[in-house]
Amino acid sequence: MIDFRPSEQPTLGVEWELALVDAHSLDLTPRAAEVVEALDSPVASRVHRELLSNTVELVTDIARTVPEAMADLDEGLGALRTVTTDLGVELMSAGTHPFARPDRQEVSEGERYATLIDRTRWWGRQMVIYGVHVHVGISHRDKVMPLINGLLPYVPHLQALSASSPFWAGVDTGFASNRAQLFQQLPTAGLPFQFDTWGEYERYADDLMTTGVIDQLKEIRWDIRPAGHLGTIENRVCDGVPNLAELASLTAFIQCLVVALDDRLTDGGMLPTLPPWHVQENKWRAARYGMDAIIILDDHNRERLVTESLYDLIERLLPIARRLDCADELSGLEQIITTGASYQRQLAVAAAHEGDLRAVVRSLIDELHAGHPL
C-alpha cells in the first residue's frame, strides 16, 4: 500500500533548479557544496543539492497562492546571492546550459547519486539538465490517477511555454526543448502510464520494487507523478525557467488546470484524456517545434496551433485564477506567447552575436537578475 496524505486545499510547492556559473568563463562550476554550506539564513533549509555539483534547487514552503510561493523563491534567490557573489558565481536557469560539456561535470557525493550513474552510465552522465517541479495539493487519493490522465492533453502547452534548451554542448539542436528528449532516456522517466485507479498504480510500483527496477518511489521520474507523502500531484514537464515572472505564470497555469479538472471530477464529470500515442506525439512536437507546434486535440484527430489553444485556455481558466488569487500571473502567459519563449530569445541572442553562446549565458543570467524577460 502506498500512503496518500490528502491536502484539504489546492496548496502549492515549487522546486526551481538553478545552474551555478563561473562569473568569468560563464561555464558551469561545481560549487554547490560550498554554496549550501555557506548559507546562514533562515531559508538555508529550502536550498538543496542535486545530482550534479553545478546545481542547487530552491524550494518553497507549502504555499496557498502563487504570489506566496513566488515570495518564497524570491527570498531564496536573495539569500543565495549573498553567498554566490562573494564566490564569483552567477546563477541562471534554463533547460540546459548552452555550451557546457556534459562529460566534464562532477556528480554530487551520495550513494543515491552514485547508484543512479552506475546504472544509467552514458545516459546518466548526459543529465546536465534543469527543470521546475510544481506540486498541487489533492483532496483524495482516488482523484490522483484520473487527474494525471486529465492533465496529459496539456503537456505540450507546458512544454512549449517553458522550452528553454535549444543548445546542447555548444550545438544548436533544432529542438525547442532538448531537455525533454534527454530526460526521458532514464529508466522510469518520461510520460506516465494511464492508470485508472490508485490500486493499479500501487501494483505497478510493487512490480518495479519486486524486480529491482527501483528502490524508492521517488525513482519513478514521470513528467507528472503522484507524491503521496505530500498529498500532491507533481508536475515535472517544464524546462528550467529563466525568470520569476514566467515561473509565476507557469505555476498559475498548472494550479488552475488541476483545480479546473478537480472541480469537474468533484461534480461527477468524466475527465477527457488522449490516447497514449497522441500524448507521446504531442510531447515530441512541443519539444521539437515549441510555440510553433501543431498539437492533436482529441481522439478525433483534430489539430491546432498550440498558441491558439493557449489563448482559449487562458480565457477559460481566468475565473478559477481569480478564485485562486493568480489572475495576473495566469494572464502573463500571453506575454510569453507574444514576445517568445526562452528558446526563441536564446536563439535570437545567439544570432545577434554571431553564434557566441557566452552571450546567451549572459542573457540568461541577466534575466534571472531582472526577474522578467529582457
Image (tube, rainbow, N blue to C red):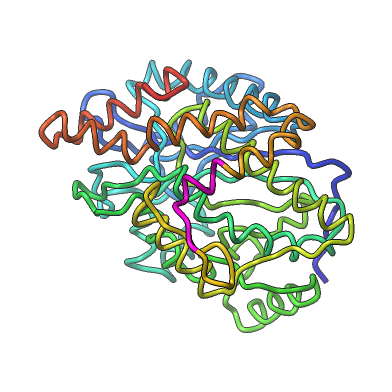
**Residue at the spot x=50%, y=55% of the render?**
156
Residue found at the far left of this picture: 354
The quadrant of the image that shows the C terminus is top left
The image position of residue 10, as x and y in percent, is 79, 42
The quadrant of the image that shows the N terminus is bottom right
In the image, residue 146 sits, relative to residue 39, either above or below, namely: below
- State whether the magenta stretch is mostly helix, strand or loop: helix
In the image, residue 43 sits, relative to residue 215, either above or below, namely: above
Stretch in magenta: 303-311
In the image, residue 84 sits, relative to residue 177, either above or below, namely: above
Query: Foreground: 231 or 281?
Result: 281
**Residue at the spot x=65%, y=60% of the render?**
225
**Residue at the spot x=39%, y=39% of the render?**
94
**Total numbered circles:** 0
Q: Is residue 306 magenta?
A: yes
**Residue at the spot x=75%, y=34% of the render?**
319
Specify whether 180 is left or right of 147: left
The image position of residue 248, as x and y in percent, is 58, 30
Q: Quadrant of residue 362?
A: top left
The image position of residue 303, as x and y in percent, is 48, 62
Q: Quadrant of residue 363?
A: top left
The image position of residue 149, as x and y in percent, is 67, 65
